[in-house]
Amino acid sequence: MKKTVFYYVDREGRNPVWEFIKDLPSAEREKCFAYIEYLEQAGEQIRRPVGDYLGGKLYELRPKQIRILYFFYWKRHIVLVHAFRKKTDAVPRCEAAVAIKRMNDFIQRAQNGELELRE
C-alpha cells in the first residue's frame, strides 16, 4: 500500500528537510526526490543501501552522502523530520536528537489536533 509522505513543518512554518534538499546541487536533489518517491511506494520494505532502521521510531534514507531521517505515523504516513550531509559512518547523536525532537513535536501537535493529515 502506498504511503503518504509529509515534510515536518515547525511552529514557525519552517520546513527544514525541504529547505535542505532545495539547496543541494541538482544531481543530489534529484537523487533525494527519487529516494523519497521510492519510500512512498516501498514503505517499511526499504532496506540497505537505500534506507535503514536507526532505532526507536527513526529510519533513514541514504542517497549518497545525504541522510534523510523519518518515522512512520499511523502506519500509512511517513514524516520526514531531518536531513543532513553525512560526515561520519554512523548517524551522529546530535543529528538523531534533532530528528527525535521534531518527531515528538509532530506527534504532540497531531494528537492535539493542531495538524491536518490528509492523504
Image: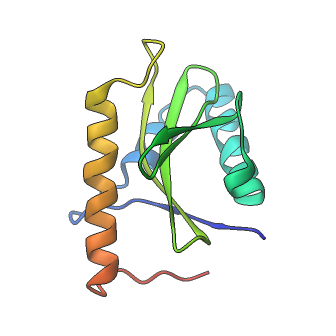
Nearest the camera: 36 or 97? 97
Quadrant for residue 102, please give it: bottom left
Find residue 114 and report its horizontal and vertical position in percent.
28, 83
Quarter that holds the N terminus? bottom right
- Left or right of 10: which side holds 65? right
Vertical relation: 57 (above or below) 33: below
Quadrant for residue 3, please give it: bottom right
Vertical relation: 105 (above or below) 61: below
Vertical relation: 57 (above or below) 47: below
Nearest the camera: 112 or 9? 112
Nearest the camera: 119 or 16? 119
Find residue 106 and report its horizontal and vertical position in percent.
33, 66
Quarter that holds the C terminus? bottom right
Instruction: State how many labels appear.
Output: 0
Residue at the far left in the pictured view: 12
Find residue 90 and report its horizontal and vertical position in percent.
44, 19
